[in-house]
Amino acid sequence: MRGLQGSRWLLALAVPAILLAQDAGRGVARLSVMSGEVSIRRGDSGDQIAAALNAPLVSTDRLYTGATSRAEVQFDYANFLRLASNAEVRFAELLDRRYQIQ
C-alpha cells in the first residue's frame, strides 16, 4: 500500500515539473549595450519604439540601428549578437540554447 501511495506522490510532483520544463524553453533576449539611434519593432503589435537599455526582446521582434549606431543583444551568459550601423535583425526563434536570427 505504501508503494502505491509513494507512486501517486511521485506522479503528482512530476506533472508540474514537466509543464514547467515546456514553458522554460521560451527565451527572452535583452538589449545589453546601445549607442546612437536604436529602435525595436514589436512582433506582436507592429509598433516601432525607441529602444532602451535592458529592453526584453522576444520571438518575431525586430531590432534596427541608425546611421552611426551600435547595439549588442545578450541571449544568455555566453551568447551575444553585435550590430553595427544601419543594421536590421529579426529574432525568428528564441529557445533555450537555440536562437534563430534573420
Image (cartoon, rainbow, N blue to C red):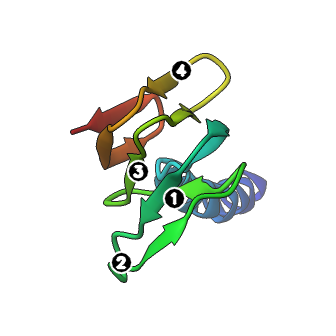
Q: Residue at x 40, y 39 (%)?
A: 67
Which label sits in the foreground, 1 or 4? 4
Q: Nearer the viewer, residue 28 or 32?
A: 32
Which label sits in the foreground, 3 or 1? 3
Quarter of the view holding residue 29:
top right
Please tell me how crowded label 4 is: few (under 14), some (14-19), or many (20+) other residues with Cα within 10 Å.
few
Q: Residue furthest left?
A: 102
Q: Is residue 19 above or below residue 79?
A: below
Q: CA distance from mark 2 to mark 4?
A: 25 Å
Disc 3 is placed on an element classified as: strand
Question: To which residue does mark 3 refer?
Answer: 63
Question: To which residue does mark 1 refer?
Answer: 23
Q: Amino acid at mark 2?
A: Asp
Marker disc for residue 44: 2
Q: Residue at x 73, y 61 (%)?
A: 9
Q: Earlier in the sequence, mark 3 or mark 4?
A: 3
Q: Give yes or no for contact between labels 3 and 2 (Cβ–Cβ under 8 Å).
A: no
Q: Residue furthest top?
A: 78
Q: CA distance from mark 3 to mark 2?
A: 14 Å
Q: CA distance from mark 3 to mark 4?
A: 17 Å
Q: Nearer the viewer, residue 83 or 16?
A: 83
Residue 45 horizontal/vertical position (percent): 36, 83
The C terminus, quarter of image? top left
